[in-house]
Image: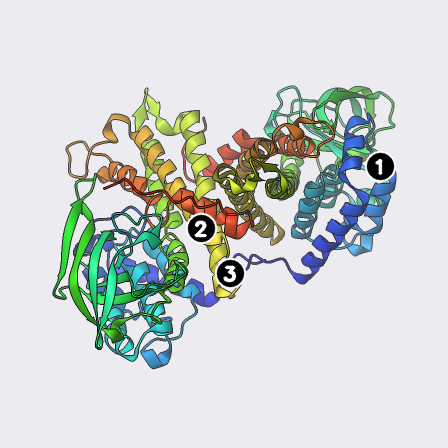
Amino acid sequence: MDFRLSPSQQILTTTARAFLRQHCPPELVQRLALDARGFDEGLWRRMAELGWPGLLIPAELGGSDGSLLDVIVLVEEMGRAGLPGPFVASAVVATSLVLAGGSPAQQKRLLPALAAGERIASLALVEESGSFDPAAVALECAVPGRLSGRKLFVKDAHIADDLIVAVRVGAAPALIVVPTDRAGIARLPLDAISGEKLFEVTFDRVEIRPDDLLGAAGDGDALLAPALRAGALARTAEMVGGAQRVLELAVEHAKTRVQGGRPIGGYQAIQHSCADLVRDVDAARALLYVAAWKAAEGRAAEADAALAKAYAGEACLAVARRGHQIFGAISYCEEHPLHLLHKHIQAASLDFGDAQLHLETVARAIGLEGRA
Amino acid sequence: MNFDFTEAEQAFADEVRRFLRANPPETFAVDGMDAGYGSGANSRAFMKALAAQGWISMCWPKTLGGREQPMFMKLVLMEELALAGAPFGPLAGVWQTADAVIELGTERLRREVLPAIARGEATFWQGYSEPDAGSDLLALKTEARRDGDHYVIRGHKIWSSHAGIASHGLVFARTSREARRSRGFSMFVVANGTPGMDIRPIRSMTGEVYHHEVFLDDVRVSADLMLGPPGEGFQALLNGLDADRFWGRFYKAPALTRVLGQLVDYANTTLGGGAPLARDPFVRRRLAAIATDIAALRLIFYRAGCLIRDGAPLTYETAMAKVYADETGQKLARLGMDLLGLWGPLREGSRWAKLGGQISHLYQTTLGHTIAGGTAEVLRTTVAVRGLGLAAEPKVAVESKAR
């Protein structure tokens, strides 16, 4: 058993930390959160130059031939920096779907551009049910035909070049890839506290062609399962990285903030709170690494990923809330970095399935019979 | 990263499972209460059966009768024993004492104590706490006075687990007055039955005896039964407590996994309001949530185990892991009591007791776990001060009024 990063993963982590410290400081995170568009093209381009969006993509399609575990280690650093943007939606989830289900023509058209960061793609899955369970998809679409209806909580739809839309062709679950410049698509922003750019996407008699199908009609659920798992793990990595940063900031504050003649970290009330931060971060990270390692090794990882996501959602949010308490009033300010880390964790805890969805998977895995 | 066992570790796990199938744990006579930590009851017969497999001494040097197996084999063994609910109560303490004797022991201790440990005959109680020295261990008053080639120990120890059925005590005593409060302590290995030693049971809230108090009335101990250099016992003790937190709690995750499995079976087969409890969304959610805690707990311990194996420095890891283990145990016991409802408080052997009455036992015993071996408060302070580098709270001397 070995919990350590490989030498190449250590280089990835170190590089990412240094890069993000320089190019994604808290002030930028603040500015992007408050800005309606909230996308820094220059930063995205530089990330692409480092090969990050192509990490999951094979070298012959322009990628950098990494593994899901590499992605997870990298996204942990992104979470630590509070990096906003479409990396998980595009480079992890949409890329996984095209890799798994795309025809050679679709792969050739999309993957090199995704790897180079020249195209951005996002998954349109959730509907008014609010569920990430593929079984909840109701939007119907004939292929070829016209698509009418709406999707909710579509991340970064405003900057996406393509949407991968989960639909039903008759009763069969299916995925279609639709360029966002096709007539009849409207992207209406939702205003979330995290500053993440979420959209309602409406489709009004949008033309759907036979070669828009990703895989065959009926493949939807089978394609979605591993991609949603990758998304859940990446969002878990963001939570762990964000919680790690909260821990570091809170401990630093506890060492330097003096009240009653000594640093507040010299009081046991604060010490014990800090000790719990360490436990939550360490435990969440350990579950994340095991699940990501299993998934990267191609083993059954459904229960492990569900466990990791459900645990991190609780633990990392607890870290964020405790962080506010340790910091006191200053962390209530908009200019302070804590609240955005907190809100990123909050958003990530809901994306690709909240604790309720994942705990149901865990419940089945530990042998509880019947479904509630 | 790699989260698989090695082939050798996996083969050993299979071997232990075969042993447990051939020697069902419930067939071994029990001598002392199951303290709920996960190591099951105290059974001399089971310790001897482990010894007969060569497993107690498997990691020792060949020159001392061992087989020089890697330390991880001990984790594999403990995990399998705990999953099976085997009564290996004294094993962790025995291993720690053996390691200390191998590292620091005199020729006599190596010659006399190690073979008895390897045979499964020697088990140990810890004579650390005293009535006025709990979390503040350095307040202890027991003294060992040099008298020729002997020491004469006088004092009063308390909360010594299984002292009444163990073979030796590890008695921590002051051997000299030094300027530094933490210096001048030494550890002695004292055989039960040594004249002047009076071991009295303390009946616990479970109705059974687990702890003892031990009165040491001029107990004469040969100087070569001192474990470690004279006056340097405190550092050795701290290292021992660090190990204690790890080895004494490593098996909690598999033990809780076993209990969780029983609660899952119970929920699947027990009707509540006309439907199986397992169909109640709240029950499902709580059981699943604690399964995530137990899974995390297991990894936290394996991660610490890897650091120990690799010789990496430990600061906060075992203190944090112990608190997490003990609080997770309390959480599971509480959940078990909730699930069993009116049947929860029934004791083992009672009419209508469910799950062998063990949940009420677990509920009571786990209360002690955040106190024994370092309270949760002391250990959180350790995590913060040693692990995170926060400044220790200034000590304020106050005359103790407790009597």
Instruction: Indicate the position of residue B122 as horizontal and vertical percent values.
Output: 22, 66
Q: Which mark is residue A40?
A: 1
Task: Check contact, mark 1 vs mark 3: CB within 8 A.
Answer: no
Which quadrant is home to the C terminus of chain B? top left
Q: Secondary structure at mark 3?
A: helix
Location of residue A241 by image quarter = top right
B148 left or right of A256? left
The chain containing the residue under callout 3 comes to: B
Mark 1 vs mark 3, foreground winner is 3
The chain containing the residue under callout 2 comes to: B
Q: CA distance from mark 1 to mark 3?
A: 41 Å
Question: Which residue, given by chain and number where applicable, does mark 2 sit on?
Answer: B319
Residue sitting at x 72%, y 55%: A14
Question: Which residue, given by chain and number where applicable, does mark 3 sit on?
Answer: B307
Q: Secondary structure at mark 1?
A: loop
| Visible residue check, residue B112 | yes
> Earlier along the polypeptide chain: callout 2 or callout 3?
3
